[in-house]
Amino acid sequence: MVCQAGDRLRGGTTADCRDCAATARLVRGRCAGCRLRARIAGVFEGADPSAAVALGPFLRRLAAAANPASTLRWMQTPAFGVTRDLLAGAVEVSHAGLDSVEGDAPQAVGCCAPP
């Protein structure tokens, strides 16, 4: 753990999060956990209603991730692009829908191909 003064010398900002008041490294005044929860809430906004219901449990678990900074980085990968497409209604929330995008993001959806 680095004190606030040492963190500022390294170019970081450790202070109290404006949302949860936890002392942590901040980006735009928020800790990683609060940024993650805000990002997940933003993903829900404008989502296809049936897709949001189907993917709600998955996204709630993401929002509670043990390592929110890592989850935020993962949300910038093509693998999370599949989730965005599912929420937008561009890909059907089904096994067939995931099969249809496997070629675009094989590491994201290629987990259960028959032998």
Image (cartoon, rainbow, N blue to C red):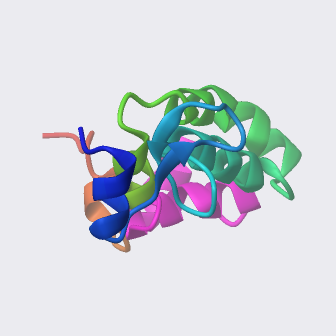
Q: Position of residue 68 (x, y in %)?
A: 43, 41
From where the camera sits, is residue 17 visible? yes
Residue drawn at x 60%, y 36% is 59
* Residue 84 included in the magenta stretch of the image: yes
Residue drawn at x 25%, y 58% is 107
Q: Quadrant of the C terminus?
A: top left
The extreme left residue here reads 115
The image quadrant that residue 74 belongs to is bottom left
102 to the left or right of 62 = left
Relative to 71, say whether 20 is above or below: above
From where the camera sits, is residue 102 visible? no
Q: Position of residue 108 (x, y in %)?
A: 34, 55
Q: Depth check: 41 or 21 in front?
A: 21
13 to the left or right of 67 = right
Magenta highlight: main SS: helix
* Residue 103 included in the magenta stretch of the image: no
Q: Depth check: 105 or 45 in front?
A: 45
**Magenta region, residue range:** 75-102
Residue drawn at x 51%, y 54% is 26
| Number of dots carrying numbers | 0
Residue drawn at x 62%, y 25% is 57
Q: Quadrant of the N terminus?
A: top left
77 to the left or right of 23 = left
Q: Position of residue 78 (x, y in %)?
A: 40, 69
Relative to 103, say whether 55 is above or below: above
Q: Position of residue 43 (x, y in %)?
A: 71, 54
35 to the left or right of 52 = left
Q: Depth check: 7 or 45 in front?
A: 7
